[in-house]
Structures are given as C-alpha cells and as structure tokens.
Amino acid sequence: MNEQTLSMRLERVAAHIAPGARLADIGSDHGYLPVALMLRGVLEAAVAGEAAQTPFESARRKVRKNGLEQRITVRLANGLAAIEPGDRVTVISLCGMGGETIRDILEQGKQRLAGSERLVLQPNGGERELRQWLMENGYRIVHEEVLRENRFDYEIIVAEPGQAVAYSAEQLYFGPLLMQEKSPAFLVKWRRMLRQKQQTLAHFERAREVPQDKAEAFAIQVAWIHQILA
Ligand code: SAM
C-alpha cells in the first residue's frame, strides 16, 4: 500500500467519500487515505488526525512529499480534538481501530461534531457496540459491507445523522443492512464465526468456572447465527 495504491479495505472506505468532501481522517497513521483521495482530486480539503508521534510525523512527511501542505492539515491530537470548526468537515473516517475505540472517540469528541457529518467507519471487531452508539446518538446506518483481505473479515459502516432508527439486538449484532442483503462475504464471515463460537461454547460447557450469564449470552448468539445462515 502507498499513497497511490490503497489496500482493498481503504478503497472500499474511499468509495463512500463523495467528490468535494472535506474529510477528517482520525487515526490516519501514514495519512494514506487523505493523501490518495487528494491526489485523485476527490477532496476539497482534509485533516489527518493522529494521536501517536511516529505516525503523525510519517503523515506529515507524506503530505509534504506530495506537495499537499495547503490542502491537508496534519494534527497531533486525541480523537476528534483534531477537528476545528474552521475545517468545515463534511465526512469523518475512523478506520482500522477496534469498534469500541471508535465508539469512545466519537463519545468523547461529541461536542466537536457539527451534527451533519457523514461517518465512514471501519471497525476491527466491536461492530455491535459501535452500532449501539450510532443508534443512541441519532445516526442512521445508510450503507454496510463486509470484505475479506489478508485473511481478515472487515466491516465498513457508513452512518448519517438525522432520522433516528431503533435497531433490534440482532440488527445491532449482524448489521441491519448486512443481515438483509446476506452477501456472499457476509455468509462466509458468519459461517467462520459459527465454527469459532461453537468451539468456544463446547469449551464453556467443559469448564466449570464460566459465569452462567456469559454462557447464556453466547448460546443466544450461536442460535442467532444458525438462524441467519438457515
Ligand atoms: N486509519 C488507518 C487505516 O485504516 O489503515 C490506520 C489504522 S492504524 C491500525 C490505527 C491508528 O489510529 C494508529 O496510527 C493509532 O496511533 C491511531 N489512534 C488510535 N487511537 C487514536 C486516537 N484516540 N486519536 C487519534 N488516533 C488514534
């Protein structure tokens, strides 16, 4: 991957960022996403936010190397603190972090949101917790997809504020749009998850010290997966 050729995962994220967007890419690491989209002429402006010094410097170097200092601002900041009102951000991407980390970043930085930004999220696990936050904070999920790259299943969740929706427990677990569409990648992911969860459940049954509520919650998930794959 480099600033011209993104991974398939980041290409699919990029597909949900419309021409003319003003992007804040939080947890930008090397800044690949904003730099690639700026070089392609997709973005009007961008902020690359990074909490760690080494990736922050790497992103800054990449922006400078491509002569984009006037178009992409790189900030060393925790979460949404990288965004300033004058940035007039229209899309926020948070990718390649755990879903619970993304949720915490959104929760801690809520006051920085203008209330109109599209969120393009690519959590590594913790999707249910992230969807729960979106629902509780008045976001509607407008697009979801699953893709497999380098032996990992990745989910992309795109959400927009307004028109709040109440999702069921299963919709939060599988994704409301994903469970409707049941794409081949979705089915492959959940067949794999079923095998893993069945093994864990068998282990729970052998082990004496697993709390009953945990084992029950797990058994419910296994039943949901059976149902969705039926
Ligand atoms: N977004 C890129 C991608 O999807 O390829 C990079 C993902 S990298 C695994 C996660 C990055 O998020 C790391 O560079 C890490 O330093 C950064 N990060 C983690 N927590 C953060 C926070 N609270 N605020 C800003 N950046 C954060």
Image (spheres, helix red, strand yellow):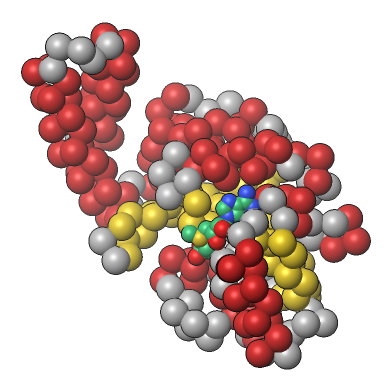
Residue at 20% x, 12% y: name it.
209
**Residue furthest top in the image:** 212
Residue 118: x %, y % from top left? 69, 53
Give the position of the C terminus as an image quadrant.
top left
Residue at 11% x, 24% y: name it.
202
Q: Is residue 12 visible?
A: yes
Determine whether 198 is above or below 209 in the image: below
Q: Is residue 176 visible?
A: no
Determine whether 51 is above or below 7 in the image: above
Determine whether 182 is above or below 133 in the image: below
Along the horizontal axis of the image, is 190 left or right of 160? Answer: left
Residue nearest the viewer, comparing 108 with 181 = 108
Residue nearest the viewer, comparing 28 with 88 = 28
**Residue furthest right in the image:** 86
**Looking at the image, how many numbered discs can be counted on the residues?**
0
Quadrant hosting ligand 1: bottom right
Q: To which quarter of the image does residue 92 belong?
A: bottom right
Residue 94: x %, y % from top left? 59, 55
Residue 228: x %, y % from top left? 28, 34
Along the horizontal axis of the image, is 38 left or right of 101? Answer: right
Residue 34: x %, y % from top left? 64, 73
Give the position of the N terminus as an image quadrant.
bottom left
Along the horizontal axis of the image, is 132 left or right of 219? Answer: right
